[in-house]
Amino acid sequence: MEIIVITCYNESNKAVEKERDNMQSIKVRKIGNSVGIILPKELGLKNGDTLQAEREGNLFILDTTQTAKEHDRKLIEESFQDFEKGLTVTEAEMKSTFGKYGWN
């Protein structure tokens, strides 16, 4: 679970101000008749991901939990596709193929 917190100006909490020193600035931009932000690729988000947004006072909280669950679900479903297609090997096959490398 990753939660992204964006702090608004006018916040007087000293702990938040200390954390703000380590934060990256994200500029709000006009997008059509609305405004939006461009998030850094280091957050690992992909086009089409959905974030849960919440405002608590001067904080905007973007929760990526649901996006992470969807990503994990996709990986699991892809893994089961290999199983359904018979693209798996037995433990005995692994031992005969990789036994010389220490597979016991």
Image (cartoon, rainbow, N blue to C red):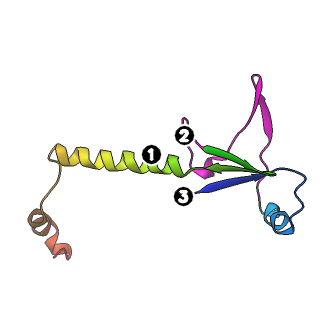
Marks 1/2: CA–CA distance: 9 Å
Segment colored magenta: 23-51
Name the residue rendered at 79%, 50% in the picture: 25
Which residue is farthest front? 57
Q: Secondary structure at mark 2?
A: loop
| CB atoms of marks 1 and 2 within 8 Å | yes
Residue matched to label 3: 1
Q: Earlier in the sequence, mark 3 or mark 1?
A: 3
* Residue 14 placement, left or right of 5: right
Residue 70 is tagged as 1
Q: Where 10 falls versus 47 (above or below)?
A: below
Residue type beneath disc 2: Asp
Estimate the spatial distance between the alpha carbons at disc 2 and disc 3, rounded to whole Å.
Answer: 14 Å
- The three-letter code of the residue at mark 1 reads Glu
Residue 88 pos. (x, y %):
17, 53
Residue position marked by numbered label 2 in the rendering: 49
In the rendered image, residue 43 lying in the magenta stretch gets the answer yes
Residue 85 vertical placement versus 88 (above, below): above
Horizontal side of 71 relative to 104 (left or right) equals right
Q: Compared to 76, does 101 lie above or below?
A: below
Residue at (62%, 47%) from the top-left corner?
Answer: 41
